[in-house]
Amino acid sequence: MLAQLLVQLIVIIAVSRLIGRGARWLGQPLVIAEVVAGIALGPSLLGWLAPGAMHWLFPPESMPFLKMLAEVGLVLFMFLIGLELDPKLLKGRGHASVAISHSSIVVPFALGAAAGALWLYRSLSSPDVPFSSFVLFMGVSMSITAFPVLARILSERGLMQSKLGAIAIACAAVDDVTAWCILAFVVSLVRASDLAHAGLTTLFALLYIGFMLLLVRPFLARLGARVANREGLTQNVVAITLILLLASAWTTEYIGIHSLFGAFMFGAVIPKEGGLAAALAEKLEDVAVVLLLPVFFAFSGLRTQMGLLDTPEAWLTCGAIIVLACLGKFGGSAVAARLTGLRWKEAGAIGVLMNTRGLMELIVLNLGLDLGVISPTLFTMMVIMALVTTFMTTPFLRLLYSPEEQAREQLVRAPEPPLPPSAYTVLLCVSHGQAGPGMAVLSRALAGERNEANLYALHLLSPERSLKARGDEALDPSAAPGGALAPLVGRAEKLGLSVRTLSFVSSEPARDICRTAQAKRADLVLLGWHKPLFSQTVLGGTVHEVMQEAGGTVAVLVDRGLTQVRRVLVPFVGSRHDRAALGLARRLVKQAGAEVTVLHVTSPDGAGAGRAQVEELFPAEEGAAVKLKVVRHASPEDAALEEAKAGYDLVVVGLGAEWGLEDRWFGVQRERIVRGAPASLLLVRHPEGAAVLAQTPEGTRTQGSSPETTQPVGARS
């Protein structure tokens, strides 16, 4: 049975991630892909196309184990949802948020309960299901908003710091708490044998909430004060937290309001100050979201049977449920938002966001199916409704709240101090922390002792990062525990360098890098490099996209322990990329006093026309620090590798086939100059049609040395 479970996990995770790539391409949240993957692995697709394969992969005897694993995953996930709920979200927005969120619960609850009472109970329920339980459950299932999905959509759209995003996330937080309290009450009614037992369950639930708020929360506050950062989160602290989490989940399960409520409540009472919540989220999120949560989606998919909707009437009923769900949630939220003073566009955007159901709806529906309140047919209809309402959020939000509208409604931020418009500007793009120190050293050399450069450090956050981690890092990316920009900022401070940090969530990193470079008028986009997982090329993936779309010079730093920039080698054959590399070398000479050797490689017959271009960039007064070495060689790449062994700190090389460097989307070629050069490398690309000398003033043309000699540029022979 263990072997069977391991095969199931492999297939579930692989299919979820594979479909997730398509969902990202469509601009949809990952939860859409995971729900679709679960349905695809169930009887609706796999069971229809290959029933034998589905029976082999998910035999009936394995389902109890899969269900238990899914339940554990849900307990951890609901704990993470509680961790993400921060009371600070309501600061200054309490009245509007409570009004909108309660309207977004009351209206759809009333519509769902009315539909259940007047129509769905007769056609899609059985007599053994209590009428009151069915009606109440339909009301709750129509009122749910998916807080985690909504938060991720806001982050991906860059709306977390906007007026709209602030109101929406606060409304979703209030909505989440209120809806789960109502659901706990409904579950207690369903599980209780009579009204007296229901009242007793409610009393125990209130006592439990009081115990969590009055006793457990202060203890957790003291515990959180001792965990100032991730290093302070010891295994003992994690063990204590997990024991308390499981005890809370067991308590609510025992008193009759389901274990998920206990997990959610325990996460919600953990103080968000002190670093405990953020550290726990970082520790547990990957296991819960990547490993265990897809199991829940697969289990839900196995219970979703599209074949049950085999008549036009069934599909019409499903369509009516979708319309009612949208009308109640969108209508109730939008009208309430308008009455609180928002414009219709903003109110409509709030309504679209609150109509997002996603994962939370699936949790509620599975709970209803397990309790026997809803039938498999109604379960399938409601799953389709959850999918449709989640899928429509992103395109409708883009339609109602365009990027231009978003820019106008951004919250007022502290303006940056004015900068000299003529200053040299570098955008440092950091994806991993290990690239930071070397980029700081190179920036010191480019800026000079007098800091004659504007330096911006950019780190783009993945949409899959937790809300808490994203919030901390977006507000102060250099101070976030373990943040990618922390090593760069730390080294820059030691070097006396001023660097401004930028960080935001991006689902299109290459485009956002280019947009940021354009907004900051960057003269140079400097990318940090890390070894890719599959590709062997330095210049593939995001690097390739940036180089293709950028309007200015782009360079990639391959850091091999760069600590100073004193001796610099520039291989040269005369391309526009080589000229851009020479331009950067000249700046290193002027700002850092670097000694530059220009290796001019000519063909064996002596043909070469690069000498004049080299001398054009370096006036006579700078010639003493720049040596021109001319060699004849059939392979420029081999000549550069041979010279690079002479003890240089940095090799600045332009892109081009002659150096074995060609940027491409995905490649398996291994660039020899990158592998073979012992020094750090700076790979430079200049866009076609742009002026290479725009950042380097014209120098005085001087006479150079004779071929196959080494002389300072500008020295007369």
Image: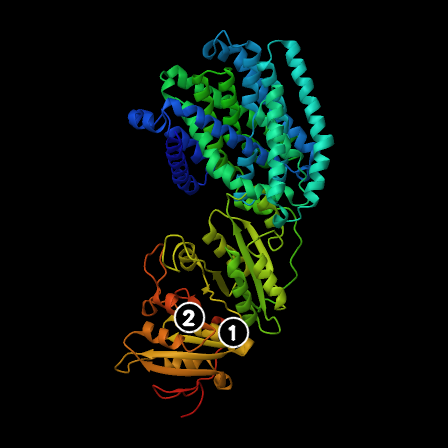
- On screen, residue 282 versus residue 655, left or right, reads right
The quadrant the N terminus occupies is top left
Residue at the spot 66% in from the left edge and 10% down from the top edge = 196
Q: Residues within 10 Å of mark 2 (few under 14, many from 20)?
A: some
| Horizontal and vertical percent position of residue 406 | 57, 44
Which amino acid lies under the numbered mark 1 shown in the image of this protein?
Val
| Horizontal and vertical percent position of residue 194 | 62, 9
Residue receiving disc 2: 678
Asked if residue 547 is positioned above or below residue 114 in the image, the reply reads below
**Residue 139 visible:** yes
Give the image quarter of residue 487.
Answer: bottom right
How far apart marks 2 and 1 lie (CA) works out to 15 Å
**Residue 175 visible:** no
Q: Are marks 2 and 1 in contact (CB under 8 Å)?
A: no
Q: Secondary structure at mark 2?
A: loop
194 and 45: which is toward the camera: 194
Residue at the spot 58% in from the left edge and 25% down from the top edge = 259
| Horizontal and vertical percent position of residue 400 | 53, 37
Colour convention of the picture: rainbow
- On screen, residue 392 versus residue 504, left or right, reads left
Asked if residue 408 is positioned above or below residue 388 in the image, the reply reads below
In terms of sequence position, does the residue under pointer 2 or pointer 1 come before the other?
A: 1
Residue receiving disc 1: 565
Q: Look at discs 2 and 1 and give the one toward the viewer.
A: 2
| Horizontal and vertical percent position of residue 326 | 52, 26
Q: Residues within 10 Å of mark 1 (few under 14, many from 20)?
A: many
Give the image quarter of residue 136.
Answer: top right
The quadrant the C terminus occupies is bottom left
Which amino acid lies under the numbered mark 2 shown in the image of this protein?
Pro
Asked if residue 414 is positioned above or below residue 101 in the image, the reply reads below
401 and 67: which is toward the camera: 67
